[in-house]
């Protein structure tokens, strides 16, 4: 047989490669692009979710109290302020009708989804594309809770930095969805609903939030007392809180009929509650035909708060006492405010107690409890409420004039110079002070030797100056600087002490409240307790309590205080007509 021909590998026949047709190529490209897109989207989402400048879910962010409160001496709430004013209420105290109303109009599948309702979100997106606007939100209650607690704060931060663009908004929405999913894993549905209704703005004030405050604002009642129609109104109002506020009609005629809009929105909520089976046809008809205006709280609109000046002073005192701003750090501030006395002080300022002789006449005073230094009421003046600059005569400093004589020139003489109430003084003209013009009495008359009581009664300048000079010689200037400091005067005043202070001269300046506090030494056995409005401050976040500044200083002896009080009593009852 013939030998087979020798062949080399290079001489073996080649197999034909199978070429991909065009459709296979397209499929591969599409699949590749899809995988690259998925991976890219995955990394983008991870980057957004883990963005260090982004949001972080924390239950503290949901429940943090953000308003400070001021209470009067009886424990009554007189003022609230801060970024948000709320009174949180627990889920157990929320009527079922309120829950049903919110679910009907805001999130009917709330108890079924996991924080993000994809079908509802897609439906809203399609509706927005068709309409050309973003009127349909598609957010669940959980997402709205996250929006109120976290997203809005981040939006405000980015806007202030000039970084809030379309990409940032999309980024925040993704973070919002992610945090909603996390929230649903961390908190039960009831707590989420509770957090949600405690943060919503219902149109009941610029900083006022939460369903409890809204219930009190509109209906004057607790949330637990709301009926079906009232619950439906509150649930429906939140899509446009200002336009759905029927009380806006009270402020006068407007282009918008707020009551009509609020009623229509309430009725829409009731209709949805009927469709979802939460109420019967009979309940629907009865609630729909109830006049909303009859349910609203009828209250007189108060344009002037008699406590306004006291509140302003209290906030400033709180900042000094705590070193923190109560408009930022939530606090409960307990004060010595006597609401009845404060109202009376306001009536005096308004001229309703005693008529004023003319428009130029003005007043200002403070009422201090001599025994403990508490300021219980203040009178800021006749024009405080109408003046935009809010000049407060009770705290502004003026020359105290002859009211300084008992405090500086006379009361200390009993302890330092050994005087008695029967002591006589010499009313004679001469140059008493090393600076300034020759000292004169206001009536330009001089009586020679006279009793101390008469000298105080007719307010002689010469005798006060003579006594003050003797006192300074006996003690030195540093003693009187410290003495004026203990009386409660400001550093720029007491540090510049000179003898002329005894008649209210030179740079002597004091406010009515400071003078009222200084005079407390006569009624309080020679001691002055630092004047204050605040009894205590409790920080709401951690319940840390900060006590009042009640430092006590002894200025004169109990005997000297009694003797000076005796003279002052005779000044009032002795027919001096001064």
Image (cartoon, helix red, strand yellow):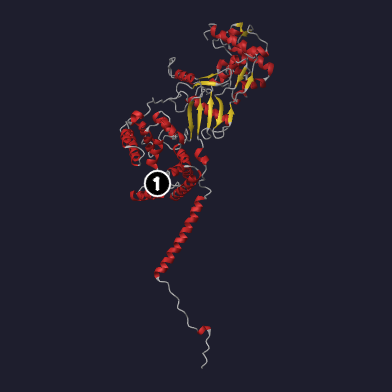
Nearest to the observer: residue 345 or residue 403? 345
Residue 353 located left or right of residue 445: left
Label 1 crowd (10 A; few <14 / some 14-19 / many >=20): many
User: In which quadrant of the rendered view does residue 261 lie?
Assistant: top left
Nearest to the observer: residue 364 or residue 92? 92
Say above or below: 449 vs 85: above
Q: Is residue 353 visible?
A: yes
Say above or below: 103 vs 466: below
Residue 495 appears at what percent x and percent y?
62, 24
Residue 289 located left or right of residue 67: left
Residue 106 appears at what percent x and percent y?
39, 42
Residue 129 appears at what percent x and percent y?
35, 51
Say above or below: 23 vs 465: below
Local SS, label 1: loop
Residue 228 located left or right of residue 182: left
Say above or below: 385 vs 203: above
Residue drawn at 44 percent across, 63 percent down: 31
Residue drawn at 39 percent across, 48 percent down: 120
Q: Which residue is disc 1 drawn over? A: 138
Residue 450 appears at what percent x and percent y?
61, 6
User: In which quadrant of the rendered view does residue 294 lie?
Assistant: top left
């Amino acid at each position: 047989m013939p030998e087979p021909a020798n062949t080399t590998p290079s001489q073996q026949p080649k197999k034909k490669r199978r070429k991909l047709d065009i459709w296979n190529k397209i499929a591969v490209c599409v699949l590749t692009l899809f995988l690259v897109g998925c991976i890219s989207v995955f990394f983008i989402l991870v980057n957004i979710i883990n963005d260090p400048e982004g949001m972080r879910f924390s239950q503290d962010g949901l429940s943090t109290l953000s308003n400070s409160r001021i209470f009067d001496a009886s424990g009554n709430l007189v003022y609230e302020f801060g970024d948000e004013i709320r009174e949180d209420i627990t889920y157990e105290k929320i009527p079922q009708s309120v829950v049903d109303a919110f679910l009907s109009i805001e999130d009917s599948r709330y108890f079924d989804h996991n924080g993000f309702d994809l079908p509802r979100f897609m439906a809203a997106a399609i509706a927005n594309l068709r309409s050309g606007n973003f009127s349909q939100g598609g957010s669940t209650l959980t997402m709205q809770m996250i929006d109120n607690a976290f997203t809005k704060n981040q939006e405000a931060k980015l806007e202030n930095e000039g970084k809030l663009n379309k990409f940032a908004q999309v980024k925040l929405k993704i973070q919002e969805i992610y945090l909603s999913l996390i929230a649903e894993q961390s908190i039960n549905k009831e707590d989420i609903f509770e957090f949600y209704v405690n943060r919503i703005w219902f149109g009941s004030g610029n900083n006022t939030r939460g369903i409890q405050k809204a219930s009190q604002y509109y209906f004057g009642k607790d949330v637990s007392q709301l009926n079906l129609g009232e619950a439906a109104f509150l649930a429906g109002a939140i899509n446009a809180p200002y336009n759905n506020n029927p009380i806006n009609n009270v402020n006068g005629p407007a282009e918008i009929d707020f009551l009509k809009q609020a009623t229509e929105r309430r009725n829409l909520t009731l209709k949805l509650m009927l469709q979802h089976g939460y109420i019967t046809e009979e309940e629907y008809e009865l609630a729909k035909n109830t006049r909303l205006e009859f349910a609203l709280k009828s209250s007189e609109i108060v344009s002037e708060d008699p406590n306004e000046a006291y509140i302003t002073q209290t906030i400033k005192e709180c900042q000094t006492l705590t070193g923190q701003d109560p408009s930022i750090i939530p606090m409960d501030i307990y004060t010595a405010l006597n609401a009845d006395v404060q109202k009376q002080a306001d009536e005096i300022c308004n001229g309703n107690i005693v008529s004023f002789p003319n428009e130029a006449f003005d007043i200002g005073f403070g009422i201090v409890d001599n025994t403990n230094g508490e300021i219980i009421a203040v009178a800021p003046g006749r024009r405080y409420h109408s003046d935009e600059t809010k000049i407060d005569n009770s705290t502004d400093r003026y020359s105290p004039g002859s009211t300084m004589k008992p405090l500086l020139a006379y009361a200390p003489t009993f302890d330092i110079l050994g005087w008695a109430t029967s002591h006589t003084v010499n009313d004679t003209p001469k140059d008493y002070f090393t600076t300034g013009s020759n000292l004169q009495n206001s009536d330009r008359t001089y009586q020679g030797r006279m009793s101390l009581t008469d000298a105080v009664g007719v307010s002689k300048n010469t005798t006060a100056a003579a006594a003050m000079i003797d006192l300074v010689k006996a003690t030195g200037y540093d003693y009187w600087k410290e003495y004026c400091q203990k009386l409660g005067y400001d550093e720029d005043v007491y540090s510049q002490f000179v003898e002329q202070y005894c008649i209210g001269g030179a740079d002597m300046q004091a406010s009515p409240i400071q003078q009222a506090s200084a005079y407390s030494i006569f009624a309080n056995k020679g001691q002055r307790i630092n004047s204050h409005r605040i009894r205590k401050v409790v920080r709401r976040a951690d319940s840390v309590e900060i006590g009042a500044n009640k430092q006590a200083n002894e200025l004169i002896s109990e005997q000297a205080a009694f003797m000076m009080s005796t003279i002052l009593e005779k000044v009032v009852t002795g027919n001096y007509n001064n």
